[in-house]
Amino acid sequence: MNEPQNVPQQQEDAKPLFSVGSLIYALKRQWLPAIIVFATVLVGSAYLTNRQKPLYEASGALIFKVDRAAQLASVDTASGSSTDASAPAAQPISLQNEELVLRSAAVADEAIKKLSFPIKSQDILAGVKVEIGKGTDTLTIAFKGPNAKEAAEIVNQMMKSYTEN
């Protein structure tokens, strides 16, 4: 005997999982809990935002100039070709060493002597961030603090103390 097989058929008029109408209907029924949750989140985030202390960041950059005059006239004797003047120097300034000098206690102590407000050397060294610019001969110095003018003065004095030494 031939029995008919049950083949599942797809419904062509499937309803979406949720619609705007169902959302409005749910809000009409549950308006009070929805307002309470919304107000709690709003007040809580406003409270936490106002509780945070402002933090300012000041930054500056030092540019190191490389003498490329020797590169302009030099010729590689092994291959007979001249070197490219736009290429980085063969012996670039060791920016890692300069970064360590900037982070040294001697530079921080020199800067503290010239600051108009009291601060500890450890606080400066902990807050100062020195980064080497990728593909450039620059060092970027940054400091974060609760006062914008003090942060800027610290960065400026650190750079001046470094360039004087």
Image (tube, rainbow, N blue to C red):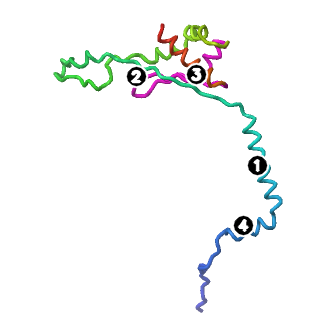
- Taking the image as shown, residue 147 lies to the left or right of residue 65, namely right
Q: Name the residue under label 2.
A: 137
How far, Cα to Cα, is label 4 from label 3? 52 Å
In the rendered image, which residue does mark 3 sit on?
152
Mark pair 2, 4: CA separation: 59 Å
The amino acid type of the residue labelled 2 equals Asp
Q: Residue 76 carries which label?
A: none
Mark 1 residue crowding within 10 angstroms, few (<14) / some (14–19) / many (20+): few
Question: Label 4, on which residue?
Answer: 23
- Which amino acid type corresponds to the residue marked 1 in the rendered image? Val
Q: Which of the marked residues, 3 or 2, is nearer the chain's N terminus?
A: 2
**Secondary element at tag 4:** helix
The residue sitting at 25% across, 18% down in the picture is 71
Q: Distance between the residues labelled 1 and 2?
A: 48 Å
Q: Helix or strand or loop: what does disc 3 sit on?
A: helix
Residues at marks 1 and 4, CA–CA distance in whole angstroms: 20 Å
Q: Is mark 2 on a helix, strand or loop?
A: loop
